Image (cartoon, rainbow, N blue to C red):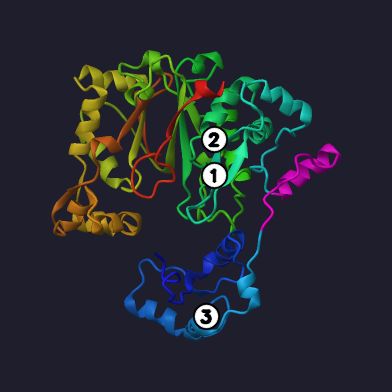
């Protein structure tokens, strides 16, 4: 139960860079008069004296003394405008008024409906053609998305996904993959200040049916299906969750190039190991898409060279530990590990067993401290044991369940990349706990 439900007045405190977002969130939740106060950014890394100066100083938004704003917000009686709230109309017109192609492109860009690359205008004819890619009714509700855990979910239907697929330049035969991605419940346009993105991996027969590329340049802009499917996921995420507008519904400080498009198939036939979707309970004949949330960091190497173990340990311990590793490996590297006697599971277990840090360094990570620490305090394992460790005591960073390996690439180099790629259904603070791998066949 909240403090306000207990009859205790409360007021929201934010840093000043979130002023527009805080007010937009209050409006979107029907409470435009929510009382809020602001302190300067940053908070992390400041001394106690610096933080006290924030409280004793001026609210950088209202330009009034912070304490005065706080006291007035807590004690001023609610008036009729406070109590009235606001209802918002969530409906959107199905069609736009006719206009020239140039003007419509400008409207889409000005309205933040694009990724600022040219789009294919979604005419009725084009959307109808796209809808032929699925047998699912156009008005079927697929799922819901939101940019952060603090905003309400927006529901959307098949037709709206098809509109965004057209805009991305996708073909009708790609639509089941795009529908499955949108049904995952994971947004490709998270508002996190850390600038997350998503990485999507396709498995099963559909890879060949729609001519996806798991060879040379699999992660790059060298294949129509890979590129436009990933782009469609990004466009539908921003347009069907209520926006992705910097300063309002997007707060990623640096941004992330993977947000344009990052979708590729696994090279199942050239891998020495079982496909990713089979590892997660699907049949090899199933077509699936798996959504990884993060794209926060990227490290790379060649392997397995004589020094591969030291290199892996450096990568694993240097990673942001809130973002479990997704290791994307060229078939040459995968076969090399297999020839050394490492099955995929054995390599994963080796990684988990050899990634350790002093507890002091582990808990000094900003996001571990912010997002994982409460789970440790609550007694959730393995975080509780890590929290009990002495500062110099080594703690294990990952469990085998945290680490994932996918094989793709053209076999021109025994390369691997280690991404921040938390399997979207796993770990504290995830957006989605149920559907990180979705069966595409259900959306054909």
According to the image, label 2 marks what residue?
182
Quarter of the image where one finds residue 138? top right
Looking at the picture, tell me which residue is in the foreground, 168 or 147: 147
Would residue 208 be counted in the magenta stretch?
Answer: no
- Residue 305 seen anywhere in this rendered image of the structure: no
Looking at the picture, tell me which residue is in the foreground, 116 or 98: 98
Q: Residue at x 33, y 41 (%)?
A: 324
**Residues at marks 1 and 2 touching, judged by CB atoms closer than 8 Å:** yes
> In the shown orientation, is residue 312 left or right of residue 215?
left
Q: Residue at x 36, y 71 (%)?
A: 46
According to the image, label 3 marks what residue?
73
Disc number placed over residue 301 in the picture, else none: none
Q: Residue at x 35, y 45 (%)?
A: 323
Say which label, 3 or 2, has the lower sequence index.
Answer: 3
Say which label, 1 or 3, has the lower sequence index.
Answer: 3
Q: Is residue 51 above or below residue 231?
A: below
Residue 376 spot, x, y in % from top left: 24, 55
- Residue 129 seen anywhere in this rendered image of the structure: yes
According to the image, label 1 marks what residue?
145
Quarter of the image where one finds residue 221? top right
> In the shown orientation, is residue 346 left or right of residue 177?
left
> In the shown orientation, is residue 354 left or right of residue 326?
left
């Amino acid at each position: 139960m909240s403090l306000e439900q207990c009859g205790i007045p409360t007021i929201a405190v934010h840093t000043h860079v979130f002023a527009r977002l805080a007010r937009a969130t209050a409006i979107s939740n029907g409470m435009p008069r929510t009382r809020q106060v602001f302190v300067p950014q940053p908070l992390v890394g400041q001394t106690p004296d610096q933080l006290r100066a924030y409280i004793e100083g001026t609210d950088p938004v209202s330009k009034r003394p912070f304490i005065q704003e706080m006291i007035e917000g807590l004690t001023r009686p609610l008036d009729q405008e406070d109590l009235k709230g606001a209802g918002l109309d969530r409906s959107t017109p199905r069609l736009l008024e006719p206009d020239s192609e140039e003007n419509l492109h400008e409207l889409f860009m000005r309205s933040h409906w694009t990724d600022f690359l040219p789009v294919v205008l979604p005419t009725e004819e084009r959307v109808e053609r796209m809808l032929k890619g699925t047998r699912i009714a156009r008005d079927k509700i697929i799922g819901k998305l939101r940019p952060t855990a603090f905003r309400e979910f927006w529901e959307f239907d098949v037709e709206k996904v098809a509109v965004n697929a057209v805009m991305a330049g996708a073909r009708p035969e790609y639509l089941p993959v795009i529908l499955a991605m949108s049904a995952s419940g994971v947004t490709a346009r998270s508002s996190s200040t850390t600038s997350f993105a998503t990485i999507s991996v396709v498995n099963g027969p559909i890879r060949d049916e729609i001519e996806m590329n798991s060879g040379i340049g699999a992660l790059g802009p060298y294949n129509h299906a890979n590129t436009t499917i990933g782009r469609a996921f990004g466009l539908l995420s921003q347009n069907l969750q209520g926006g992705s507008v910097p300063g309002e519904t997007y707060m990623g400080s640096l941004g992330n190039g993977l947000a344009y498009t990052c979708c590729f198939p696994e090279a199942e036939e050239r891998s020495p190991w079982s496909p990713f979707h089979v590892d997660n309970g699907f049949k090899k004949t199933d077509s699936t898409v798996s959504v990884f949330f993060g794209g926060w960091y990227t490290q790379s190497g060649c392997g397995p060279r004589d020094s591969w173990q030291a290199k892996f340990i450096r990568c694993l311990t240097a990673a942001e530990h809130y973002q479990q590793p997704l290791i994307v490996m060229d078939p040459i590297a995968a076969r090399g590990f297999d020839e050394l006697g490492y099955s995929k599971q054995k390599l994963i277990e080796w990684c988990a067993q050899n990634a350790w840090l002093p507890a002091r360094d582990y808990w000094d990570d900003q996001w571990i401290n912010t997002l994982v620490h409460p789970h440790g305090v609550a007694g959730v394992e393995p975080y509780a044991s890590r929290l009990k460790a002495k500062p110099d005591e080594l703690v294990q960073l990952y469990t085998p369940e945290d680490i994932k390996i996918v094989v793709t690439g053209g076999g021109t180099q025994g390369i691997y990349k280690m991404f921040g790629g938390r399997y979207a259904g796993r770990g504290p603070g995830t957006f989605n706990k149920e559907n990180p791998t979705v069966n595409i066949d259900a959306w054909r």
